[in-house]
Amino acid sequence: MDLKLDNFELRRLITDALDGNTDSFGVLVSYYDDKVRPYVERLCNNDYDSNDVLQETYIKAFNKLATYNPAHGLDVWLRTIARNTFLDIKRKQKSTESFLVDDTAKYDIASNTITPEDIIINNERVDKVEVQLSKLAPHYQRIIELRYFELMSYNDIATTLQIPIGTVKTQLFRAKKMLVKIIDLLDK
């Protein structure tokens, strides 16, 4: 959707949605769908699953809107919900598969199944990175988001930001280096 909203309008829509206004939430979904949908499609690799994940994501987002922290972008929050929804669905599919082939339980085979603990650890890591990401300069934040949250290629980032691909690579390298330094300082 080619909808243009300024920060004041976005805050008003979020406030209205928090008050239960489904129309305002619908406008927010339409506004951010162009950022969330490609991310989900890359995760799922098919339209059927991506539509399910998107629908679940928006339902969860509406029900959990009170937990949204306005210090972070709503699009990042929605993509986080989408990623968690995708992981939940995959985990359920794996548990169904393991139920069907329960005979393998008697063998000592390493499992590739995503466990609830794996999801919690992954979510904690992502939350930590997202918080520290806000400490970078806006252009570095944007390039990290495009590459790692929206899963864009270098060419797509160069086109989106209208900069040469070499600049994309350089800025991404610098952004990652700064982010690692910030996170390392926290761990000490």
Image (spheres, rainbow, N blue to C red):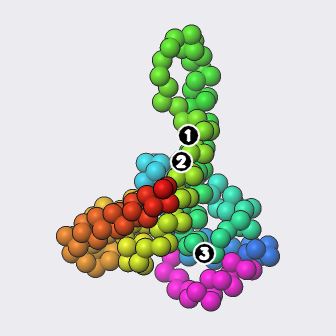
Q: Which residue is mark 1?
A: 118
| Residue at the spot 57% in from the left edge and 72% down from the top edge | 72
Looking at the rendered structure, the kind of residue marked 2 is Asn
Q: Which residue is mark 2?
A: 122
Q: Are marks 1 and 3 in contact (CB under 8 Å)?
A: no
Helix, strand or loop for disc 1:
helix
Q: Which residue is mark 3?
A: 71
Q: Quadrant of residue 75?
A: bottom right
| Percent position of residue 58, x then y | 64, 61
Please report the bounds of the magenta region as a residue range: 1-16
Q: Are marks 2 and 1 in contact (CB under 8 Å)?
A: yes
Q: Quadrant of residue 155?
A: bottom left
Looking at the rendered structure, the kind of residue marked 1 is Asp
Measure the C-alpha gap from mark 2 to mark 1: 6 Å
| Apparent side of residue 133 relative to residue 127 in the rendered image (left or right) | left
**Along the viewing direction, whichever of 160 and 46 lies nearer the viewer:** 160
| Apparent side of residue 67 relative to residue 131 in the rendered image (left or right) | right
Within 10 Å of disc 2 (Cα), the crowding (few <14, some 14-19, many 20+) is few
Looking at the rendered structure, the kind of residue marked 3 is Ala
